[in-house]
Amino acid sequence: MIARLRGNILEALPGRLVVDVNGVGYLLSVSLTTYDRVNPVIGAEVDLRTHLQVRETSQTLYGFAEDSERDLFLLLIERVSGIGPSIAMAVLSGMPVDHFKSCVVNGDAAALSQIKGLGKKTAERIILELKDKIGVAEAWQAAEEGGVPSAAVDAESALIGLGYKQAEARKAVVAMTKVKPDSSTEDLLRDALRMLNS
């Protein structure tokens, strides 16, 4: 699995980048948000988080400027029924991650359905499944209200995206936050994974 790429941009089109990593050109599908954030200039160095989607007839490498974008992408394709990579990329292109979280927390299907390729029923299903099935919206709401550090919420969401149940993800993140209160998302995630796998 390819998890991250650092290299120089060879080609750049909205929604697509080719990145040269030690002489190998990797074609990445990217959201418009990522495309704008990396400011794609030929020859510029980029550092992208990635996800490799393998299907019977194709292999597609998706690139993300930030961990939060990759985590949301994985959450959508792995935990919401009927959502594939193309719709998940449309969501990331259609609105910032924080605005998406706010829409889910507030049950704003109308705002989500404004995203190109996302109808009202799909928007309602996303909200319903993220709220009821895996409880992600609860963690996002706690972060909005300022009760939980954002690094803890992001680490918990990442663990849920990796397939852990919300209760065990929260327990591990809370335990690690007590040990190291000022940890970054990456440190919390790494420590929580160690705890869950020990």
Image (cartoon, rainbow, N blue to C red):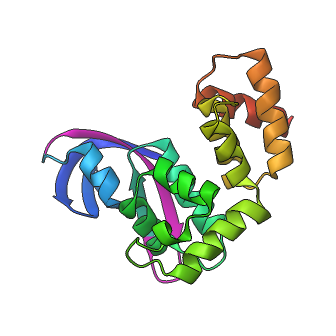
Q: State the residue in front, 26 or 39.
A: 39
**Rendered-image quadrant of the N terminus:** bottom right
Left/right placement of residue 79 relative to residue 93 reads: right
Vertical comparison of 109 with 45: above or below: below
Residue 21 in view:
no
**Rendered-image quadrant of the C terminus:** top right
Residue 162 percent location from the top left of the image: 69, 52
Residue at (63, 54) in percent of width and height: 105
- Specify whether residue 48 is painted magenta: yes
Q: Quadrant of residue 168?
A: top right
Left/right placement of residue 54 relative to residue 197 reads: left
Vertical comparison of 80 with 40: above or below: below
Residue 24 percent location from the top left of the image: 29, 52
Q: State the residue in front, 160 or 140.
A: 140
Residue 47 percent location from the top left of the image: 35, 39
Q: Main secondary structure of the magenta part?
A: strand
Q: State the residue in front, 145 or 29.
A: 145
Residue 32 percent location from the top left of the image: 30, 59
- Specify whether residue 143 is painted magenta: no
Please, which residue is most extreme toward the left here? 42
In this picture, which residue range is highlighted in magenta?
A: 43-59
Residue at (18, 57) in percent of width and height: 12
Vertical comparison of 21 with 16: above or below: above
